[in-house]
Image (cartoon, rainbow, N blue to C red):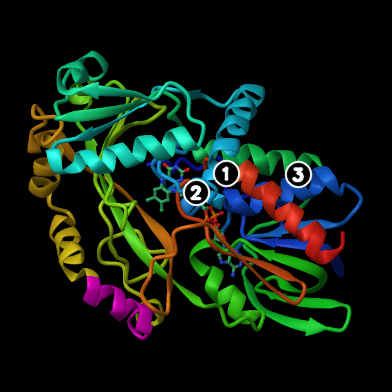
């Protein structure tokens, strides 16, 4: 997992909060940082601030993800996800080149292991082509070994534009650029309330209160709560899903050249354990997805009564659970089970043994769920007076961050009249 603390906790005091800022980005994950960066490049003359609850940036989803530079294969053509992923990926690669951030375009193989999955693989290929992906290649069973010598399947799709990067490093570079441009990052500064004023808002934080003209809520796992602080009654609630990973033993990493994914179930695009090489050479398997009883708790035993109640008291959660209880039980059974993970992975890499799987890290997805129990699929942005709220930024949010930052800066310019 990408948990390397690229930004060591500051020993110097935090910069002083202003009396009044023009725009505040709430949250120093990759989306809040990219948004502040885009705003500062366009509107250099205004006072922009980033406030972050934790002692360093990228501590939550951004620092606990799979590190994949997604190509744009999965997403419905025309959706915000598709547009921002394809555009964002190209810009991310140029950015990494400029900043000297290591990355690798290693390609990905999506493997069907059952003939029943072939129509879904066809649909993926169709979406990929509609989204303008280059070099997609359909591989009959006997050609799979040309790309991944240890993998098997009945059919596969080769996606050469997929890559890997450490998003903690990318977010750290955005943060460094912001500080160099004179945009202060106020760490250890949790927003606790937002009060309306005639000409702005008062942002209440654990480090003190200040006024702002406008704010952009990029609080990830807490984004629905920050929206409610601002008086919005969002039509969605964040339901946190913990994803657990196993690391492949170092001497068995040679079983994989790049990335191997199963064909996803379109109802749950984030399910299906995959094998991912990371830029540091390690290989991980996962994640599964189980309800997290604490929004920012990474251990299996983590529990927070308020967070648990927030999920369990939401009618949408029960509607989803009734509809998909079988899938949920399957994911729970896989939780922490080396044998289940191993069995799933052997469908496409038969040489993998349970003993090759070593306990790895975990990540928590901020999944927005609507009142009818539907998982919100696309990026979701809502407005309230003087604020924009990012209420769903799932994968490929990190890949797409530069494009999403620009989308949010455009909306801010339009909505806030910057
Ligand atoms: C398991 C997993 C695997 C993933 N894999 C990939 C992948 O391979 N490729 C990809 O492109 N995407 C991937 N994603 C998605 C990607 O990580 C997210 O889209 C992206 O990190 C979202 O960034 P964010 O800034 O919205 O959220 P976060 O990174 O969670 O940042 C939100 C920030 O807001 C802060 N905050 C919260 N509340 C407050 C408050 N009240 N006051 C101040 N600050 C606050 C938090 O401390 C946090 O730092 C994955 C996600 C997960 C969970």
Residue 378 image position (x, y, % from top left): 49, 57
> Compared to 142, does 344 lie above or below?
below
Identify which residue, 255 or 367, lies in the foreground. 367
Does residue 16 show up? no
Residue farthest to the right, as pictured: 45
Q: Decide if ligand 1 comes within 8 Å of the CB at mark 2.
A: yes
In front: mark 3 or mark 1?
Answer: 1
> Compared to 89, does 391 lie above or below?
below
Q: Is residue 251 magenta?
A: no
Q: Is residue 268 left or right of residue 164?
A: left
Provide the secondary structure element on which disc 3 rests: helix
Judge the density around disc 1: few (<14), some (14-19), many (≥20) Cα neighbours within 10 Å.
Answer: some
Provide the secondary structure element on which disc 2 rests: helix
Identify which residue, 109 or 397, lies in the foreground. 109
The residue where tag 2 is placed is: 62
Tell whether label 2 touches label 1 (CB within 8 Å). no
The residue where tag 1 is placed is: 83
Q: Reading the chain from its start, which is encountered first: label 1 or label 2?
A: 2
Q: Is residue 313 magenta?
A: yes
Q: Name the image quarter holding residue 187.
A: bottom right
Q: Is residue 30 left or right of residue 305?
A: right
Judge the density around disc 2: few (<14), some (14-19), many (≥20) Cα neighbours within 10 Å.
Answer: many
Q: Reading the chain from its start, which is encountered first: label 2 or label 3?
A: 2
Q: Which mark is residue 281?
A: none
Q: Which mark is residue 179?
A: 3
Residue 75 image position (x, y, % from top left): 44, 46
Image point (18%, 22%), residue name: 251
> Compared to 34, does 126 lie above or below?
above
Identify which residue, 37 or 299, lies in the foreground. 37
Tell whether label 3 touches label 2 (CB within 8 Å). no
């Amino acid at each position: 997992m990408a948990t390397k603390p690229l930004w060591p906790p500051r020993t110097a005091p935090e910069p002083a909060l202003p009396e009044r800022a023009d725009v505040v980005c709430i949250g120093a994950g990759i989306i809040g940082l990219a948004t502040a960066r885009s705003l500062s490049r366009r509107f250099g003359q205004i006072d922009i601030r980033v406030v972050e609850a934790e002692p360093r940036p990228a501590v939550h989803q951004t620092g606990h993800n799979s590190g994949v530079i997604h190509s744009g294969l999965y997403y419905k053509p025309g959706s915000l996800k598709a547009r921002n992923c394809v555009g964002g990926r190209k810009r991310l690669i140029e950015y990494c080149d400029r900043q000297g951030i290591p990355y690798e375009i290693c390609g990905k193989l999506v493997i069907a292991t059952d003939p029943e999955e072939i129509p879904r693989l066809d649909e993926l290929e169709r979406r990929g082509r509609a989204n303008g992906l280059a070099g997609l290649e359909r591989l009959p069973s006997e050609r799979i070994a040309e790309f991944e010598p240890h993998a098997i399947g009945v059919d596969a799709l080769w996606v050469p534009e997929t890559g890997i990067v450490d998003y903690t490093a990318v977010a750290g570079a955005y943060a460094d650029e912001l500080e160099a441009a004179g945009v202060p990052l106020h760490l250890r500064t949790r927003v606790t309330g937002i009060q309306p004023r005639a000409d702005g808002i008062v942002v209440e934080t654990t480090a003190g209160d200040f006024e702002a003209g406008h704010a952009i809520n990029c609080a990830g796992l807490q984004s629905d709560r920050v929206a409610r602080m601002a008086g919005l009654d969002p039509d969605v609630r964040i339901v946190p899903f913990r994803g657990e990973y196993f690391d492949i033993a170092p001497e068995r990493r040679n079983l994989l050249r790049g990335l191997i994914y199963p064909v996803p179930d379109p109802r749950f695009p984030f399910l299906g354990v995959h094998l991912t090489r990371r830029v540091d050479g390690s290989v991980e398997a996962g994640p599964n997805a189980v309800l997290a009883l604490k929004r920012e708790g990474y251990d299996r035993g983590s529990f927070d009564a308020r967070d648990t109640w927030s999920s369990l008291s939401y009618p949408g959660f029960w509607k989803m659970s009734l509809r998909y209880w079988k899938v949920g039980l399957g994911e729970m059974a896989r939780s922490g089970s080396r044998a289940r993970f191993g069995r799933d992975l052997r469908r496409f890499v038969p040489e993998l043994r349970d003993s090759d799987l070593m306990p790895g890290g975990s990540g928590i997805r901020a999944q927005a769920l609507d009142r009818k129990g539907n998982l919100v699929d696309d990026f979701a942005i809502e407005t309230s007076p003087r604020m924009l709220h990012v209420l769903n930024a799932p994968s490929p949010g990190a890949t797409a961050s530069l494009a999403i930052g620009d989308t949010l800066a455009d909306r801010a310019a339009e909505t806030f009249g910057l």
